Image: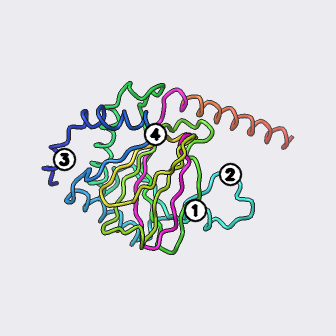
Amino acid sequence: MPLGHIMQLDLERIALEYVVPCLHDIGFCYLDNFLGEAVGDRVLERVKRMHRDGELADGELAGPSRGVAKRHLRGDQIKWIGGTEEGCEAISFLLTLIDRLVMCCGSRLGKYYVKERSKAMVACYPGNGTGYVRHVDNPNGDGRCITCIYYLNKNWDSKLHGGILRIFPEGKSYVADVEPIFDRLLFFWSDRRNPHEVQPSYATRYAMTVWYFDAEERAEAKKKFRNLTDARKREAALNED
């Protein structure tokens, strides 16, 4: 794997001098030319193969949609991967690099203590005008604290293709538009500080997202889930009597 560009990256400096200050000051930031074209191409080719081979399924919606067609709320097709799957070496390398960058942020992420993340969600908007309506990734304390999105779209023209990620920073008078261009890595807080939407896409749009968890909030969310599951099981057992 050609690593010349990546060997020049000073992840600790990038984390401490750019990512951490930007997250605290405005709630989001992005890095361009993160992997370099050669390695980014390998990630893109693997994602295109997943799409071509029919491995992506319609993204799910959380909560009730009140009779609105799902396609009008969320139009992406997704697949969850760990990076250890056959042929995913470049994706695994990307995830390792992002992990290292987040770990370099260390204790400087305010109240958060990050020690785990989700699997990677590969997503494709097929270019038929679908997007994802305004939403918050973690509105109810499920543990996600940082959303990280890697974009894979070459020659993207937002005036022609749409597909902008628009962030509505809480309490701010402005919006932030992020174009989903190839080899761009975006970070933002996952909670209610950053409602966001994917505007309709008119060309095939690829991205890969991972979420980093705050240890304390994640443990509490798992505890609540277990308690709720146990309560439902007890209720079902009583109803069977």
**Is residue 204 left or right of 44 when viewed as pictured?**
right
Q: Secondary structure at mark 3?
A: helix
Badge 1 or badge 4: first in the primary sequence = 4
Residue picked out by circle 1: 74
**67 over 108 or under it: above or below:** below
Q: What colouring method underlies this structural image?
A: rainbow
Mark 3: which amino acid? Ile
Which quadrant is the C terminus positioned in? top right
Which stretch did the figure color magenta? 193-218
Give the CA separation, mark 2 to mark 1: 13 Å
In three-dimensional space, the C-alpha distance between marks 4 and 2, rounded to whole angstroms, equals: 26 Å
Q: Position of residue 85 (x, y in %)?
A: 35, 54
Of labels 2 and 3, earlier in sequence is: 3
Identify the residue at image location x=74%, y=35%.
Answer: 231
* Whether residue 168 is visible: yes
Q: Residues within 10 Å of mark 3 (few under 14, many from 20)?
A: some
117 within the magenta span: no
Image location (x, y in percent) of residue 33: 25, 53
The quarter in which the N terminus is drawn is bottom left
User: Residue 6, labelled with which disc?
Assistant: 3
Q: Is residue 204 magenta?
A: yes
